Image (cartoon, grey):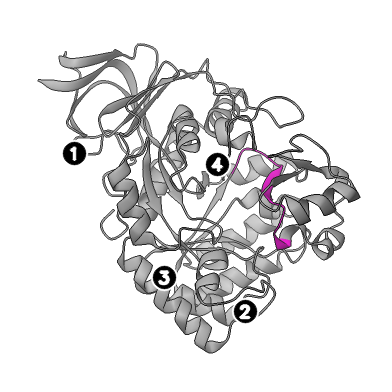
Amino acid sequence: MLDLVISNGIVIDTKNTEQHPLNIGIKDNKIVVATNDVLEGIESIDATGLYVCPGFIDPHGHIDGHPYSGELSACQGITTTIGGNCGLSPLSTGHFLREQEEKGFIINQAELIGHSFTLRKQAGISDVYRKATNKEIDRMCGLASEALEEGACGISFGLDYSPGASYEEILQLAKVCAKYDKVMPVHTRLFTLYDNHSLYEMLSIARATCVKLLISHFVYQYGEGLMEDALEIIEKARQSGLNIMLDSGMYTNWATLVDTATFDERTLRDNDVMLSKLIVATGKYYGRHLTPSLYKELRKYHKDDSIICITNCKDEMYMALNRSYCMPSTDIGPYQKGEGHPQIAGTYPKYIKEMVRERGDLSIEMAVKKASYLPAKLFGFCNKGQIDVGYDADITILNLQEIEDLARFPHEGYPDTKPKGIYYVIINGKIVVDQGMTRNERAGRVIDGRNG
């Protein structure tokens, strides 16, 4: 007998960008039948009036084994997360993957090896403004190769956080990434919020190495009046044969740690960022707008607190997510309950609600394809991103008319309020989200980057 049957739903075919009324049968952790015939199973879900979608794959996260962030991801339909982004990852990929496999986790996890915090630290570089020596570059390349051999699915960069990283440093690591045919997600440099120099730098790297380049949270990088030009640059590069993809969140305001180069005085000054546009997202001063005295206190005594920057243009966010090569992403971090940025709980419901139901920019089929099939193809997850016989039983079931994000910014409400309209989430054949309630909190598996 089948373990689980999903009946009467509208199944999204992401490969062909179509929808079909089908019944789905699951055995162990796999989809074993997709048919119009009546099926029986130990458990059953009546999906009448609901869309049955491949589970969403978040290409840009910072969960790295954090349980509450994993729960928030599952509740918004995410079945797989890629961690270690922006150059910040566990020091040992192999140890992290083994530990997560032993402990279990609510959703599937793949992991990148990070450059800007992790590899530079391991190479002995403590000054974010210092260039690496040739010996240190060689050391980082060796460590990156080791991580990829241990199952990392790519090398990530947070160049905004390591302004001293040289072109040569990035180039040599990109060559390592290309050698292993892995993805290179890049949080580009912050020369200023008002130019595309950082984008040209990464295209030059891609051209020199043929690496699979993913520009991270694109609207956060180029959403301050640059989007139209930035997308034109990307499209010309893609037409020339470069393998470039984008991911972008559903919010214009971004968040990061206060004790990074992003919030150095010179960076704020060069980008005309006023302290009043910065909001504390975690810790003792949660929800407070920054003042000169609070800025100094946070930088000195609360270095791990996150700050939200109020910036960017909403129209530019939609402009990016309308592109066929741009995937939705959360940029979720390991926040405590009641803290953080609403992207941690609201991204994918907001994406479906606004892009499909309200604006009509995307069909439900295309929206789901961009949230599942595209990241699966990019990262080489050959058994994910589709609902078909033989594929992993990672499935999100939603009500298009009800789906809604309820998470809000700290000064407006609670950033971790769970959404409406995500009825069920199934991971490796187990029901993890059931009408908004979580169970089977160790259903996820580790994804080994060596075999997808």
**Marks 4 and 3, how far apart at CA:** 24 Å
> In terms of secondary structure, where does tag 1 sit?
loop
- In the picture as drawn, the residue positioned furthest to the bottom comes out as 134
Toward the front, the furthest residue is 301
- Secondary structure beneath dot 4 equals loop
First along the sequence among labels 1 and 2:
2
Which numbered mark, 4 or 1, is in the foreground of this view?
4
Look at the picture and state if 427 lies above or below 199.
above
Residue 257 placement (x, y as % from top left) = 67, 52
Left or right position of 13 against 175? left
Q: Are marks 4 and 1 in contact (CB under 8 Å)?
A: no
Q: Is residue 70 above or below residue 374?
A: above
357 sits to left or right of 423: right
Residue 250 in the magenta stretch? The answer is yes
For the point 81% across and 36% down, which residue is it? 288
Residue 237: where, in percent of width, then height? Answer: 55, 65
Along the line of sight, the residue nearer the viewer: 99 or 77 = 99
Q: Which mark is residue 330?
A: 4
Tell me which residue sits at (83%, 62%) in the image: 265
User: Could you tell me what secondary structure mostly forms the magenta stretch?
Assistant: loop
Mark 3 and mark 2 lie on one chain; the one further toward the N terminus is: 2
| Disc 1 target residue | 390
Tag 2: Cα neighbours inside 10 Å, few (<14), some, or many (≥20)? some
Identified by mark 4, the residue type is Thr
Which residue occupies 59% across, 60% down?
234
What range of the chain is rendered magenta?
A: 249-261
Q: Which residue bears the numbered disc 2?
A: 166
| Point 63% across, 29% down: residue | 338
Locate residue 191, reporting x and y percent: 74, 67
Q: In the rendered image, which residue does mark 3 sit on? A: 177
Measure how far apart labels 3 and 2 are at the Cα level. 17 Å
